[in-house]
Image: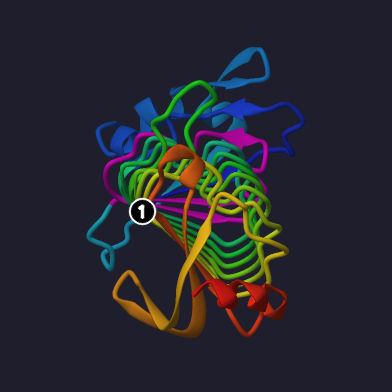
Amino acid sequence: MITLHPKHPFKAPVDAECISPDVFAEKSAKEIAALQIWEGNRKRTLSGLFKIKHENDSSSKEFTIRICGDVSKVRKIGAKMSKGNIIVEGDAGMHLGEEMKGGVITVTGNADSWTGSMMKEGTIEIKGNVGDYIGASYRGSTQGMSGGKIIIHGDAGYEVGCFMRKGLIKVHGNIGKFAGIHMRNGTIFIQGNSEGRAGAQMISGKIVVCGHIPSILPTFTIDNVRPKVKVNGEKVEGPFYRFIGDLADGGNGKLFVSKTKNTHLNSYEEYL
């Protein structure tokens, strides 16, 4: 196991794509210390910005990187990683786990926007809140998250799961507008409230909202009322209104919304 401690609070963004088990596992201690990263527009070495401690951890079979301290300015931690573990004891920056192919990332604090963007496999777990565009594609791309799991214990921002193609995003808290926009497949499970416009332009996939949602997009039609819904093998008790859409895009996505938390949607029942 390798433990990293920031030597000072970062004021400029730090681009640290090299902080990955795939990169560290193949290098000696000297080579790890000499890895190149950017702090703002200045090229640094990893040892110039972090205290590096090598520890033997016989309890773990996977290579582990532990980061202690506030790295909310550090971007691309775990980018493209395919194995091992990263544990961030603090807040993490943008693009955490970008294009991730395997392994596990755990953050005890918050994470910034674009967490898990375009990820393919693996697990990301955030104990705090996250920003916008979680599991999403980049602007101009249609390749969103295509596998793996993102678990958020706090709240999430806008456009979570944009162009999502496969996998699971689970939000224990509340979520911003446009969850599942352009969604192609996969599942978004929201245990809290949604700010609305969920599933805009979705083609397929499943969105489950257990809390309150202000309204349903007019391009969705009510299908039926379900007593429960299955999410990744787990049965979630309802009842839930099930809507189909986005019909404006020829979509057949499923939007499940709690009936008991959304009595203002009762008028839809006359169309069943």
Residue at horizontal 68 percent and vertical 72 percent from the top: 212
Q: Residue furthest right?
A: 11
The magenta stretch spans residue 229: no
Q: What x and y, as percent, mark residue 200?
A: 56, 45
Q: Quadrant of residue 79?
A: top left
Is 126 in front, or is 10?
A: 126
Quadrant in the picture for residue 124: bottom left
Residue 162, can we see it? Answer: no
Q: Position of residue 198 (x, y in %)?
A: 58, 54
Q: Is residue 100 above or below residue 236?
A: above
The residue located at (68%, 53%) in the rendering is: 176
The way the protein has been coloured in the rendering is rainbow
Kind of residue indicated by mark 1: Gly
20 or 46: nearer the viewer: 20
Disc 1 secondary structure class: loop
Residue at the disc numbered 1: 186
Q: Which residues are magenta?
A: 63-91
At x 63% / y 71%, what residue is drawn? 192
